[in-house]
Structure formats: structure tokens, C-alpha cells
Image (cartoon, coloured by chain):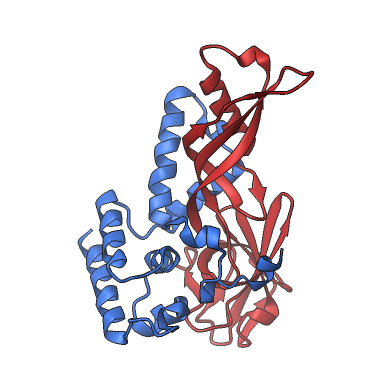
Amino acid sequence: MFFHIVLERNMQLHPRFFGRNLRENLVSKLMKDVEGTCSGRHGFVVAITGIESVGKGLIRDGTGFVTFPVKYQCVVFRPFKGEILEAVVTLVNKMGFFAEAGPVQIFVSKHLIPDDMEFQAGDMPNYTTSDGSVKIQKECEVRLKIIGTRVDATEIFCVGTIKDDFLGVINDPAAA
Amino acid sequence: MSGEEEENAAELKIGDEFLKAKCLMNCEVSLILEHKYEQLQQVSEDPMNQVSQVFEKSLQYVKRFSRYKNPDAVRQVREILSRHQLTEFELCVLGNLCPETVEEAVAMVPSLKTKGRAHDDEAIEKMLNDLSLVKRFE
């Protein structure tokens, strides 16, 4: 789910940026530093939308760098366990399939794909029901439920399931 | 973090910080990101190079999964859903997935039916009807 939240960060600024454009410099450095990053707690920072406040700078002893506490609003993407969302299938293999929802990758193991769907190898590997009516392959849109998240310093990785009511393929551009 | 273990969106356990935060539906994110992208286009020749991979992927994703394209419809959807005492998170899940039946809506957002909240099937059905009207007249 996407959220609009306020985050705070201490920005260190080199003295050569002090002057009329201090604020602009601070903001552009902030964007460069945090946009596109990911933390386990807040998820992926997609875009900064505004600056709430820039606090008083504190000169660091010995270096001349100044630290400013900056509060900023941003759009973040944070997946949650139990959340249901839509995703695009990116890779299918005999273990299951990978799907992408924005910046996050979700793996759906074949044990979490309905039992009546069988893996079919070939140049377009896919999972198909025995009557061939439903097919999961690359570029399909699926609705899935996140059942687990793994967080490390710079990445969030999810495990999902489509073995539940109202989950599964919602659209297949290749079949249309 | 012990809070991390307990997390479960189906029961609205998403941490205080996010529960109080403003959630965004995909269509709203799409408006924000496209606006930002246009701004970038004005200052640089090759904006795709300027943005992070996270931004690019998110933009593609929300463009693909936006149920409502025009800003007025987006505003109406939020207005309709906010009449129903939903939390921000529930509101956005419903706005994103656009369930068609009451059963589907409850499967998508199980917390609608918990802790004796005033959501009977009729109220949910009315809400879904209102939503589909917005979609139809967009």
C-alpha cells in the first residue's frame, strides 16, 4: 500500500553550499539521498512531495559541516503481511512464480498456487488449469495476498499466495 | 522489533504509525507521480534518467492498476468511501481492488466484519453500488 507520511532526517551539508541557495541545496541533496531508498520500517521512498520544516543547523566540531534536521513529506510504498494487492507476473518456473507490485518483488510458491493448476514448461512457461481456462504466465495480472515479508537493509521481499477466495489471475494481456 | 511479528493487515495490525498515516489509492499515487514527472520533464531533457528505479517502477505500476483516471472521479471515490467510517487502510484497499460483491469485499477487507462495527451487508452493498456508479459515469 502507498502511504503519504512525514519523515525526518538529519542532513549534513558542506560549508560550500552556505549562501542564498542553502535551502534549495538542502532539498536537492535530500531528494538525491532518500528517493529510491528502502528501509524495513517505512518501506520504499518513492517520491518527496514537500518539505515540512528545516530545523536549526548545528555546526559539527572540527569539520565545519552543519547538520540540519529536515522534516519532509513523502510517498512511500510499504507492503504488509495479510494485505491483498494486484501485481504483474514477471517470471514463471517450476518452483512457482515471481510478481512485481511497484518496487517490491513477490514470490508465490507452487504450493500456494491452487492444486488444479499444473506447471507447463516451454518457451512461455506457465501454470494452467486442467481444462485450460486459466493460465498464469509472464505479464499476467494477478491478485494475491502477502503472507510473509523479509526485510533487509535495502530491500523488502515478499511471499504471497493465490490459494484463497477471490485471488488469482485478473487479466492476461496475451490472451486478449 | 516485536511489533514486526504481530503485523497483519487483515486485522488492521499495521503499526500505529501507518494506521494514522494517510493512505493513498493507486489512482491518487498516479496523479502525484505523473505531476512530479511532468515537473522533471520541464527542467531536464531526459527525465527517465533522473528518477530512481523505485519511482519508475511505482509509476508504471500505478498507471497499470489505476481504476479511475480522472481526478474528479478519484476525489468522488474517496468522498464516498469516507462516509462509511472506514480506516484509511480499508478505504484504500477497497478503492484499489473495487470488489463487486459484498462477499468479495469482506474477503478483501476482513476487518469490515470484526469487532462489532456497524457494517452490515446492506451498508457494504450500498457502498459498492456507489463506487460502481462513479466508475460507470467516469
Q: Colour of chain B?
A: blue
In percent of the image, x 65 and y 82: which residue is there? A118
**Could one spot residue B18 in this view of the protein?**
yes
Q: Is residue B20 above or below residue B58?
A: below
Q: Is residue A29 above or below residue A157?
A: above
**Could one spot residue A92 in this view of the protein?**
no
In percent of the image, x 49 and y 24: which residue is there? B45
* Residue farthest along the left direction in this orientation: B137
A112 vs A38, nearest the viewer:
A38
Percent of width and height locating residue B34: 41, 41
Question: If the image is split into quadrants, where does the C terminus of chain A sit?
Answer: bottom left
Percent of width and height locating residue B41: 44, 29
Residue A59 in the figure: left or right of residue B84:
right
Q: Is residue B134 above or below residue A160?
A: above
A98 vs A116, nearest the viewer:
A98
Q: How many marks?
A: 0
Task: Please tell me in which quadrant of the rendered image residue A128 appears.
Answer: bottom right
Residue B94 in the figure: left or right of residue A35:
left
Percent of width and height locating residue B57: 55, 48
A164 vs A38, nearest the viewer:
A38
In percent of the image, x 74 and y 73: which residue is there? A95
In percent of the image, x 69 and y 78: which residue is there? A110
Task: Please tell me in which quadrant of the rendered image residue B87 appears.
Answer: bottom left
Percent of width and height locating residue B85: 33, 70
Query: Which one of the lettered chains is coloured red?
Result: A
